[in-house]
Image (cartoon, rainbow, N blue to C red):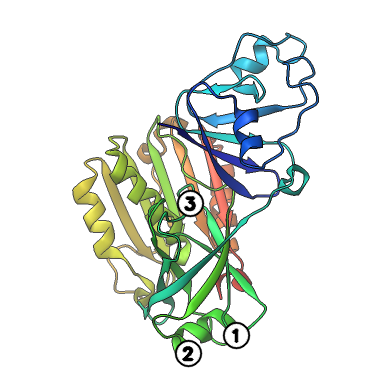
Amino acid sequence: MSFTLALNFEDGVSRFIQCNPNEKVLDAAYRQKINLPMDCSDGVCGTCKCHCEQGEYSLGDDYLDEALSEQEAAQRLVLTCQMVPTSDCVIDVPMASTLCKTGSEAFSATLTSANALSDSAIEFCLTLDDERGIAFLPGQYVNIEVPGSDASRAYSFSSRPGSRQISFLLRNVPGGMMSRYLTDQAQPGDPIRLRGPQGSFYLRTPTRPILFLAGGTGLAPFLSMLEQLVTEGSTQPVHLIYGVTHDHDLVKLEQLERYRQHLPNFSFLSCVASAASQWPHKGYVTQHLDENQLNGGDLDVYLCGPPPMVEAVLSDFQRRAFTPASFHYEKFAPSQAS
């Protein structure tokens, strides 16, 4: 039995390694050719200091207070030359991946399907060549090469981590390189190359109620997060508010209904901004936030959508003088979505 460690670097790259029982993180990383920062490897200098975002571990006993103070340890700072994981962990490394002689991984896959879910959204699915699948944190993204070009586009996974079958949801941008490929040229079996995973927007271990705020195809990472919550059998209250511009932009509602059946404390509301909408809930995401959902600030908020939507939510929180226990957000630009 081994533990999976996600090493998140400052440049957004994530690398996943295996750590054996009673093995120190630094040794596990070196064994897998990732040179985490270090000078002494004896718990003296503090050069290898990182932050453990989630997971259980032993700090080790053989280090000096000057290298890691009691206060730092209470804030989940660790010395990787001493830290011994006792579960899967996510570790933030305060250094670019290139300085640790590593980088994002390259994967090859074949196109399984590409379907227009609406005039504005396309879902495409890939089968990875590697039967082990790809490890990522739900909410993260990969860079996918546009076939027939030197360009690549960043897309968030909409599928669960660890599977060989992966899926993505993107905005159909007229004239966009990936949109044009998927709508006009794509054929099942086409080879696809991708690199990743990346991103600091990912689901943390649920310890309190969760609020998801999605705009348009910013729904994609939340589908991955919900898949993970179903897999874990989470009982934390989760509420999703999903906003789009027009009625025909709404997608994946049946899938959201399935999550409601499998997650006893999951609820969602979909809303449409257009004044011409016939949808029961009209207006913007911020208009459907009530004080009960904000739980007095005792909740984790995740926000993903186009920049205007993200900025509107940030302004709304500021107007309310609302500060959640934790807040994670990601914007996507049109060039990323096409």
Q: Which residue occupies the foreground of this view, 92 or 120?
A: 92
In this rendering, the label closer to the viewer, 3 or 2: 2
Q: Up-down: is 139 above or below 229?
A: below
Q: Up-down: is 29 above or below 272?
A: above
Which of the two labelled residues, at mark 1 and mark 3, occupies the earlier sequence position?
3
Q: CA distance from mark 1 to mark 3?
A: 28 Å
Q: CA distance from mark 3 to mark 2?
A: 28 Å
Under circle 2, the secondary element is helix
In this rendering, the label closer to the viewer, 1 or 3: 1
Residue drawn at (21%, 41%) of the image: 264
Image-quadrant location for residue 111: bottom left
The residue labelled by disc 1 is 148
Which of the two labelled residues, at mark 1 and mark 2, occupies the earlier sequence position?
1
Q: Up-down: is 337 above or below 30?
A: below
The residue labelled by disc 3 is 139
Residue 319 visible at all: no
Residues at marks 1 and 2 touching, judged by CB atoms closer than 8 Å: yes
The residue labelled by disc 2 is 185
